Amino acid sequence: MNAVAESVFVAQPYQAVGDIIIDCKVDKIFYGDFLAVRDSTVPIEKKKITGFIGPSGCGKSTVLRSLNRMNDLIQVFRFVGSVIYHGQDVYAAKVDPVLVRRYIGMVFQQPNPFSMSIYDNVAFGLRLNRFKGDMDERVQKALERAALWKEVKDKLKNSGLSLSGGQQQRLCIARAIATEPDVLLMDEPCSALDPIATRQVEELMLELKANYTLALVTHNMQQATRVADTTAFFSVDISHGGRTGYLVEMGPTKQIFEDPREQLTKDYISGQFS
Amino acid sequence: MARLFAAADSATSVSGPPSAGDYATDSLFRGIAWFSAFLIIVLTGYILWEILREAFPAIQAHGLGFITGTTWNVNKAEFGVLPEIWGTLYSSLLALFLGGTFGIAIAIFLTQDFIDHRLATVFRTVIEMLAAIPSVVFGLWGIFVLIPLLKPGAEWLHSQFGWFPLFSTDLAGPGMAPAALVLAIMILPTVAAISVDAFRRIPYKVKEAAYGMGTTRWEAILKVMLPTASSGILAALVLGFGRALGETMALAMLIGNANQISLSLFSPANTLASLLASTFPEAGQIEVQALMYAALVLLVITFIVNVAGLAVQQYTIRKFEGKK
Ligand SMILES: Nc1ncnc2c1ncn2[C@@H]1O[C@H](COP(=O)(O)OP(=O)(O)OP(=O)(O)O)[C@@H](O)[C@H]1O
Ligand SMILES: [Mg+2]
């Protein structure tokens, strides 16, 4: 390490208590020449919910989407570091990103249903994975869990795009959970939802946690305290002219919100920053 | 009259009503738009009326027998266009199949990250330049390049698979195969350019959603991108088919102008448009009336194709996009 590297702040590593399912060590993430995120170690614990919080533009989505190689779609994206999932680096040359995304599902910040029927939207992943069982039952279960079933049960043949924005987002959640992926990444899944639907989705997350692992980006502090077991706080460094995001602190949610180690975290949580 | 919402004005507010000039431009623009739309309808109606008027004696004389008849004999005043209707539809469908398949394939190639997007723009420009080539040039190219090129293959196919209806005759010169191939090349730019636009209109988040579900590239294209772009692609196909139905010059040069109905790709045939083009110059009054009738038939076919295409497009929009 050179002298400059020593002078920049690097978060103290979080000592996970349980099994780590995804061990994400970001060294640097670039978009072209732009250094978006640096030096962030974010271990995702198995069968827990890991929350990502921090100001807009600090790289929460960037880190989250690096976990299942979603960012590979962006040509200028470059990841330096490692993401060890079940003992295998997902960025290793021999790993097909398609395979990674089959096991690590994703719900996006903006609702993005396919232009096909509601039913086909939810069945999409099941068909893709050549599911042989009772399709109707699976689709219904996914829609029920996403708190959408009651509203759409009589119009499953209608296009997914005919729904309202909040309904579309719940449809996308249903689509993502229908295959019950090992890990589910959720990028501000509730930003388009009303408080009732938000609570239902939160309950879903807690229910899924029994068998699956979740990582959640949220701007809603209450949401983080309600559902996240572990919270990672990111911030953005504008002191050197760039806008580079980095991990400030990661720990059990209770500790982060009640007894943060870093001043930055304290300020952000008490609303003196943003 | 008191100004509406006058109470909304405050010392610092810059909000205010649109000026009289704003309203005037608005009405002017609306007027021009209405006038143009109206003009198109009037013009179409007028052309239809003129053709109907000219064709009327022929309609009276031949009735529906004109559509089912298979001979075109001026001396006996016997006129029938069934072979031309067949030739028109057959050549256009072949062209639609070839041009459509390749057009959509090219659109996928250009929009789905197979090549760098600057290179894609170059490709696209080249393809659109195809559309600027005059159809007589395509005709000449067909006669001097394509037909000689096709001959050996056609001969072989006929000698080996002559029992198969599509290869039941030999390619003597002009015929269905060179005509349909050139037609396919001519509609390719239309289909490709409009399909490219349809694919480009798909929001990035849809692509993200597809790959996020763990699709391979082909799964994403076939299961998500194609259905999403389907209404635009259908529009491209309808437009291409319409162009193929009406194409005249290149076909008049390449199809052989033979009054016969055959499934064979290598036998000469005729189309309505090329019948019109090649017969008009030397036609007498009776024959001109019959040709006007033929033009009417072509117009009706084009109309039906367009309406049917529109109906299918509306259906896909409803089904996939959920719009009313
Ligand atoms: N596709 C991209 N190309 C170039 N730069 C990008 C791209 N996506 C994100 N960035 C940049 O990376 C940085 C981090 O963005 P990111 O979307 O990860 O932030 P975020 O923390 O999720 O913000 P928000 O809370 O607003 O969603 C930003 O400065 C952004 O401008
Ligand atoms: Mg984000």
Image (cartoon, rainbow, N blue to C red):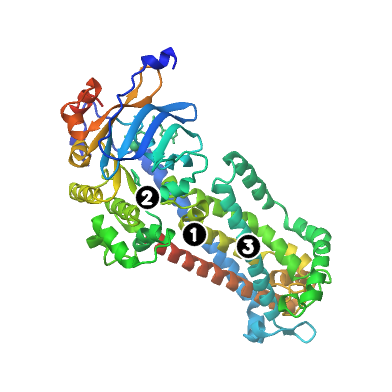
Which quadrant of the view contains residue A269? top left
Q: Which residue appears at 43% of the width and 62% of the height?
A: A130
Q: Which residue is mark 1?
A: B230
Residue A124: percent from the left, percent from the top?
A: 40, 59
Nearer the camera: disc 3 or disc 2:
2
Q: Label 1: state its secondary structure.
A: helix
The image's mark for residue A87 is: none
Q: Quadrant of ligand 1?
A: top left
Residue A110: percent from the left, percent from the top?
A: 34, 45
Q: Which residue appears at 34% of the width and 49% of the height?
A: A182
| Front-lying residue, B130 or A191 | A191
Quadrant in which the N terminus of chain B is drawn: top left
Contact between labelled residues 2 and 3, with CB atoms less than 8 Å apart: no
Q: Label 3: state its secondary structure.
A: helix
Q: Amino acid at mark 3?
A: Arg
Residue B170: percent from the left, percent from the top?
A: 81, 74
Give the vertical position of B36 relative to B318 (above or below).
above
Q: Which residue appears at 32% of the width and 65% of the height?
A: A156
Q: Quick check: is the Cβ at mark 1 less than 8 Å away from ligand 1?
A: no
The image's mark for residue B243 is: 3
Mark 2, other Cα within 10 Å: few <14 / some 14–19 / many ≥20: many
Mark 1, other Cα within 10 Å: few <14 / some 14–19 / many ≥20: some
Q: Is residue A52 left or right of residue A127?
A: left
Q: Label 2: state its secondary structure.
A: loop
Label 1 and label 3: CA atoms lie apart by 20 Å
Picture mark count: 3
Contact between labelled residues 1 and 2, with CB atoms less than 8 Å apart: no
Q: Quick check: is the Cβ at mark 2 less than 8 Å away from ligand 2?
A: no
Which quadrant of the view contains residue A41? top left
The image's mark for residue A112 is: 2
Label 2 and label 1: CA atoms lie apart by 18 Å
Q: Is residue B134 left or right of residue A15?
A: right
